[in-house]
Image (tube, rainbow, N blue to C red):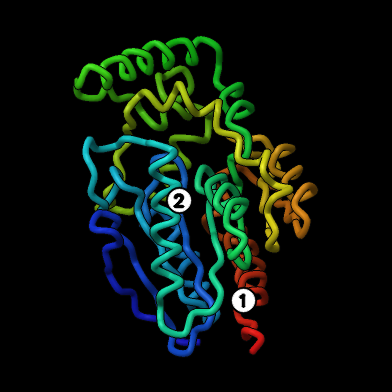
């Protein structure tokens, strides 16, 4: 199929989104990115490929990030991000001709996709790529000294927010030893490899999220995901638990697992992107293009 034109739209007044809507599409995929990430950091490449496969694709920036509205900036609120997913899903369901809606989430967004799929029985398929399924396991990967420094700033930010103060920010990604949520050796070069010139991504988050990441464990709800779900894991992942993600595929009634012998950021580009997106597009097209029974 020829390239599909991208449209700029706004959902719910604040959520900036890109829409690809091929003529005759009966299935739509809602896409959301990972921790602090925005839509131009290679996740748009997945949306384009899904559109080429005949699916409508709706890719959004979370509120407080990128092109979306919301103050203060760079505030990562898990509850609000899940609300943004549901806002996008509602919009996708209202598109002309759409009968089935699926989800694609990557990294932190992969956890969100699983959380939403577990709570919405009308989702027809979901893909979670290098997903953060267990925040506690992810938090335990942080070096102890870094964890203490992050927690100190996070507590200051949380207390300050309750007093109406401006956020205290920390880096989303940094080099090993720096105060950042992600400081594995491949974190900073990985983000740099995904970020085009002129991107609206900022390497900052309100530090309070450091107190709550460990409590977010969307993989626990895998057994409640009734739709087919494809879990794509990077076996050399430095940021999220591969075992916890693989367990989701085992626990979900219709789970499938794809393993790739690469690191967390390698799946977004080059050969491994091609391998992953080809399987993902086939999976989504298979489950989202069936006609509704009269």
> Observer-nearest residue: 252 or 173?
252
Q: For the point 49% across and 15% down, which residue is it?
A: 147
Residue 19 in view = yes
**Residue 3 in view of the camera:** no
Position of the C terminus by quadrant: bottom right
Place of residue 151 in the rendered image (x, y in percent of width and height, measured from the top left): 43, 14
Task: Give percent across and percent down for residue 196.
Answer: 33, 53
Q: Which disc is residue 196 wearing?
A: none
Q: Quadrant of residue 205?
A: top left
Q: Quadrant of residue 104?
A: bottom right
Q: Of helix, strand and loop, which one carries label 1?
A: helix
- Name the foreground residue: 132 vs 188: 132
Along the viewing direction, whichever of 237 and 64 lies nearer the viewer: 64
**Could you tell me which residue is drawn at 65 percent across and 64 percent down?**
275
Element under disc 2: loop
Quadrant of the image occupied by residue 48: bottom left
Total marks placed? 2
Q: Position of residue 263 (x, y in %)?
A: 61, 43
Q: Is residue 24 above or below residue 150?
A: below
Q: Callout 2: 10 Å neighbours few (<14), some, many (20+)?
A: many
- The residue lying at 62 percent from left, 84 percent from top is 292
Q: Is residue 17 left or right of residue 1?
A: left
Q: Identify the residue at image location x=26%, y=63%.
A: 10
Residue at image mark 2: 33
Viewer-closest of 257 and 248: 248
Q: Earlier in the sequence, mark 1 or mark 2?
A: 2
Res 285 label: 1
Looking at the picture, does residue 188 appear above or below residue 248?
A: above
201 displayed left or right of 1: left
Residue 269 x/y as whole percent: 52, 57
User: How many angstroms separate mark 1 from mark 2 (CA)?
Assistant: 20 Å
């Amino acid at each position: 199929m020829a390239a599909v034109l991208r449209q700029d739209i706004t959902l719910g007044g604040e959520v900036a989104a890109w829409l690809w809507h091929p003529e005759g599409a009966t299935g739509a995929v809602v896409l959301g990115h990972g921790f602090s990430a925005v839509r131009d950091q290679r996740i748009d490449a997945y949306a384009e490929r899904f559109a080429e496969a005949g699916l409508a694709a709706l890719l959004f920036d979370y509120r407080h990030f990128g092109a979306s509205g919301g103050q203060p900036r760079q505030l990562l609120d898990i509850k609000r991000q899940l609300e943004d997913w549901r806002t996008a899903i509602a919009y996708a369901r209202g598109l002309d001709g759409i009968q089935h809606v699926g989800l694609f989430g990557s990294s932190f967004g992969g956890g969100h996709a699983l959380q939403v799929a577990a709570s919405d029985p009308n989702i027809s398929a979901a893909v979670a790529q290098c997903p953060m399924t267990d925040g506690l396991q992810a938090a335990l990967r942080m070096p102890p000294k870094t964890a203490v420094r992050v927690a100190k700033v996070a507590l200051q930010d949380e207390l300050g927010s309750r007093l109406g103060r401006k956020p205290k920010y920390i880096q989303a990604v940094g080099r090993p030893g720096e105060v950042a949520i992600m400081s594995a050796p491949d974190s900073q070069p990985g983000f740099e490899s995904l970020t085009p010139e002129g991107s609206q991504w900022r390497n900052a988050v309100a530090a309070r999220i450091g107190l709550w990441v460990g409590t977010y464990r969307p993989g626990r709800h895998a057994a409640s995901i009734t739709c087919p779900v494809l879990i794509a894991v990077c076996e050399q992942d430095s940021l999220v638990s591969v075992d916890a993600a693989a367990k989701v595929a085992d626990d979900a009634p219709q789970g499938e697992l794809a393993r790739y012998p690469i690191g967390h950021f390698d799946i977004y580009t080059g050969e491994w992107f091609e391998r992953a997106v080809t399987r993902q597009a086939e999976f989504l097209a298979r489950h989202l293009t069936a006609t509704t029974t009269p």
